[in-house]
Image: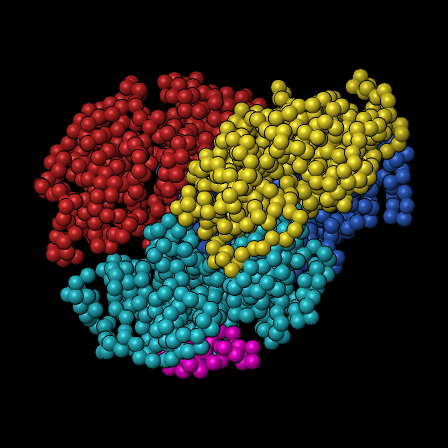
Chain colours: A blue, B red, C cyan, D yellow
């Protein structure tokens, strides 16, 4: 693309470029982050869009990055993969979005053209996948460059609420796809969700799309369990006594649950799922795991179970938009704290002490 | 049922009862078996049928039993869960079969009435499941009692071949259900089968119902691999060098296989499946496992895979019957040795030294 | 079965046989019915149960029968295929139910053994299907004989409400199976239901198991539409102006609906479904049709739609029981009138003038 | 795109532009066609590719167009929607194809970005669908412009055969998607295909991916039936006696077929499908219909059948490529005649008299 062209697409009433500098939350190695000046992103490919962020949020994965757990994230990277914003610029190959459009940014970037995208596995897109705030700069900034914009942005619905809609960037499709759809939740099912953090609660909210008869919520934290109760859990189990599986088996009269959803990512919580899944049942893994688990094939080989893993594909975003618009899902129930974008360092402190602060999702507003 | 009734059903031209004694292969604790006199079975419940065995076979599971691996099998049990025979007697509740009918005996007994049977999970039938030659006397005998006969027998097709049809008792539905259907084999797929024993070969035969593009067969034994080649495998991999997974990844240009089917039941072979499954792929377990395996969730959590286990339900028996009758499946290709039923002790010796003898399925004929 | 046996099973504290006569609603040819004395039914087959009716109801199909529309129903037939009751006697082959059990009677009789039952198509059972109140005597009586009792009865849940549970005999599984499941209703879908009679309202109730975003209810009767509103319809369309399809297309901005459910059984209502189904959508037929319809293949051939028909199989009864028990479905909302069983002639009058009487389901109680 | 840019992408060793004129088969109103000079197509959008045609073919739809049946096709249109060729030029937004790539052209153009493409319904793409040789110029020419090239072209497999691969442009995905997949053909099924023309034979070839037990082929023409026999049909039925349905019912002992596939597009052939579909079966429509059909809902309402329509989406092209490469499908068996592209007027004459000429697919080679 020639410079002349670029000028052309960025001129006009919607263009507010007054500076080439912006503020962004930048990773500087383990435990180091700063809200500092960075160059504003520019169009690099015909499929790119530049989006001015109006709302963002922090994900549990961002905390993992800050601990240094993800070697793919290097010094100087702008973090964040969730956000709402307004399109400022588009490349010449972008056809579905225009300057001035308000958009939901998907945490997964999808070229739509590769074999994985064609199969609906955007998470494994050969030119995208989860790259925002990972291998390219992310959304905890004033501006972000979104590659393959046509596959990675969604129109913000008229009359929508930004803090609700930002839950569609990642957490709600994650709960729905990795937990509920992979777990094949059906009307009348008994479902157990291990982990009542934000993503476990997203599973809880979206599991109710399919009218299960019972939802057992398992966590160590009574405050989170209390939230789960409000959001539709039918039975709360505090697992701090080490007997969560035993309780579930008693409550199900020895049958176990049709669907066990792991929303933590540890061997111990994975073990609970194995212990409570009924014959013919499903274990759906949502948690991010750092080490191997012991799989009891000597007990499970003849139990007719399925076990699934998944990185969110965000293919359900159109479905979620329709359900949210119908009023049957209220994602803002997950939001406990709100900060100005400029206070993002404080927001990270709060979210980093989620248990103490009673924090679930922490929203950042421009 | 009164004695009078029983007499009634067993009198008439079809009744050949001349003695109350029969020969049977009896388990007497680890490593002890005998072909000896046993009382002939009688109707105990309205749903029972007594079948005179004309063809039977030996399963790998029978060898496990003889090692003492299955505590559910106790001293005095008649072994065997596969067979073809003729109905000699039926209880008053049996409606689908009549004296004189030639039948295929399913390895799984299904009451058809319980919640599991209603869902097609006959393997977990609350009144049946795998009980023949396990918790009740089995088919390696002159006569066998089949409980819930209407759910556990199938009509032998006119013009059928007994040694082909006895493969429908267990091994073919096992390969098809646990391996192929759970693995969701599709046209064009790359499939790997780990283990070229009888059940792995049954997977191979039935996988071809769905026209995969490539079938990699992995085993330590070149003779078995050569059989696999004849039965449709497209690539043979001898895993004795410890690099089977590496070879598969090279052959698939790093992509891995759409479906990896475990047909051995050991941690090492299960590990191969984990290492070669493509993103978005399926691991279908067929093997019987005696100990836990290490599941690499730290690598698999974001790979969008599914892993399934299953004890054969034999719900596909009607489908298999239709395919065999159409000539598209020739199950007798699995048969390498034939013995008279009276030579069953020798047949066990041969089957117990399968590698040396080049044995796959060993058929016993009356 | 010998007489001696029969005596045996019917003796004891639970047996209340004081007479061989009962009252029943008997069909005597078109427009002729009587509440009159009939012989009490007796066990005829090992799979039979005799049930004493405590609650029954009248189905739209019963009105069709009374018009003489169903030649399979002949003079002298006891009508009715829905009911709740108590098991009075069981044949020797019945294993799942016992004297004294309170049960839900399914409108469809399932032997569980034939090829259709094995595939979950109980409606086409070779020994059953819809026979009650059709080819054998039915449930609008003091007692009824239920063949194949193990496949045709369901345990009444502890603490259940009879007038709610009798909706599980027919109308709720019909709405769910023929309408919702065949229509593949998904979260976020736009669904149109043509016909707000009892079965259309059963579709409405059960469609909500899957969280559609919009439910358009189409009928000629504003009273029924008002009920639909209370039960969850999002948009009401009175079709008396002949422009129902036009209204739906306007409201969906020309897209049409994902699922169009026909719950009337007339060419005109079927035509509405064809006119409003979106590309890629489903038409699920629930209505009973008496004549052919014109199918606009010249418009539909390239629209990627599916059209389904179904006689209820009642395979979803276990699922419905779980959802009702969880409190997520309240079937008694369909009940508008209650009568003593002895007043069944009046109940028929009321139900036969449903529009004028504002009647939906009319419950009969012993 | 600036002129300078266009020059850039078209310069270099692969560019062979020597003239701005090409030969093409042009429609000039009903019954008028000419092989005449036309301007060579040029890039009009960033997603376009210009492909030099090396192989093409004629579709039954082209004959319909020539009769004047499709008002969307206007005077001056280059016909043809099938072809193999070499990429000559690409727009700046094309990422998956490069100058010099040999490609299969899909009959359906897919933007991949719209809601229909996202759901795999490329046929209803909001910016594409079936437009080639319909609303834009097509492939029966020396060059063609392919919009949305990344979604509408497929890499020609190394070592492939052009006359086999051109069957992947339309006829094989049509048979597979509209007939076999919509009909849910399963191992052991009885399948009837009504119409043994090229598309019916494509159904026949691809149905065998799923190992049906019986395939009844129904047609008026014994020559075509003889071809069907060679390609795998198990039973041939000449329908000229007007009793095809009767014969199928006799041969299936009154059960009918699991899947009835309509590959003609007439009320009479559609009627056969209705008459022979088994309870629980599927009717899959492939034929292009010009008028309504009578649907016997008075007979079908309780038969648990499904009826599907579909315009080919070509989403199965990757699967078909894999099966063809594996050698399990030999599409060139459909080719009966070959012509030089310059003789296309003769090729149309031959294809237009298919019955007399014994023509199936007629291949055009540059």
Residue ID at (53%, 34%): D222
Q: Nearer the viewer, residue D54 or C19?
A: D54
Q: Is residue B84 magenta?
A: no
Q: Quadrant of the C terminus of chain D?
A: top right
Q: Is residue C14 above or below residue B48?
A: below
In the image, the segment drawn in magenta is C340-366
Residue ID at (89%, 27%): D4
Does D42 sit left or right of C334 as displayed? right
The answer to whether residue B263 is visible is no
The answer to whether residue D305 is visible is yes
**Residue C26 horizontal/vertical position (percent):** 37, 75
**Residue D117 horizontal/vertical position (percent):** 68, 43
Instruction: State the residue lying farthest toward the left.
Output: B19
**Residue D126 horizontal/vertical position (percent):** 73, 45
Does D110 sit left or right of B245 as displayed? right
Q: Is residue D261 above or below residue C216?
A: above
Q: Nearer the viewer, residue D324 or C210?
A: D324
**Residue A366 horizontal/vertical position (percent):** 77, 51
Q: Is residue C342 magenta?
A: yes
Instruction: State the residue lying farthest toward the front.
Output: D241
Does A332 sit left or right of A182 as displayed? right
Q: Nearer the viewer, residue A212 or D77?
A: D77
Q: Is residue A90 above or below residue D9?
A: below
Does D138 sit left or right of D336 as displayed? right
Residue ID at (68%, 29%): D350
Q: Is residue A148 above or below residue A241?
A: above
Which corner quadrant of the image does residue A323 belong to? Answer: bottom right
Q: Quadrant of the N terminus of chain D?
A: top right
């Amino acid at each position: 693309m020639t410079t002349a062209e670029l000028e052309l697409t960025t001129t006009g009433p919607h263009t507010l470029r007054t500076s080439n500098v912006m503020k962004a939350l930048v990773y500087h190695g383990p435990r180091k982050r700063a809200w500092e000046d960075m160059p504003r992103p520019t169009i690099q490919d015909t499929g790119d869009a530049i989006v001015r962020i109006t709302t963002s949020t922090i994900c549990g994965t961002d905390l993992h990055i800050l601990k240094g757990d993800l070697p793919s994230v290097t010094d100087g990277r702008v973090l964040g993969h969730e956000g709402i914003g307004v399109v400022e610029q588009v490349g010449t190959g972008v056809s579905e979005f225009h300057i001035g459009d308000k958009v939901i940014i998907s945490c997964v970037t999808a070229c739509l053209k590769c074999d994985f995208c064609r199969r609906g596995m955007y998470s494994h897109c050969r030119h995208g996948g989860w790259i925002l705030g990972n291998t390219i700069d992310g959304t905890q900034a004033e501006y972000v460059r979104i590659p393959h914009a046509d596959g990675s942005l969604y129109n913000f619905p008229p009359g929508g609420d930004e803090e609700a809609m930002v839950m569609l960037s990642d957490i709600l499709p994650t709960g729905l796809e990795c937990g509920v759809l992979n777990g094949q939740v059906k009307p009348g099912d008994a479902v157990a969700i291990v982990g009542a953090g934000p993503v476990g609660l997203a599973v809880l909210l979206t599991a109710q799309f399919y009218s299960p008869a019972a939802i057992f919520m398992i966590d160590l934290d009574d405050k989170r369990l209390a939230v789960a109760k409000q959001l539709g859990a039918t039975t709360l189990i505090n697992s701090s006594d080490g007997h969560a599986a035993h309780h579930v088996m008693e409550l199900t009269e020895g049958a176990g649950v049709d669907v066990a959803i792991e929303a933590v990512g540890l061997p111990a919580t994975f073990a609970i799922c194995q212990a409570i899944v009924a014959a013919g049942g499903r274990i759906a893994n949502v948690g991010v795991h750092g080490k191997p688990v012991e799989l009891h094939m000597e007990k499970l080989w003849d139990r007719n179970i399925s076990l699934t893993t998944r990185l969110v594909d965000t293919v359900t975003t159109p479905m979620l938009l329709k359900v949210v618009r119908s009023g049957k899902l209220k994602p803002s129930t997950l939001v406990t704290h709100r900060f100005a974008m400029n206070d993002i360092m404080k927001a990270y402190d709060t979210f980093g002490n989620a248990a103490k602060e009673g924090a679930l999702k922490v929203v950042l507003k421009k």
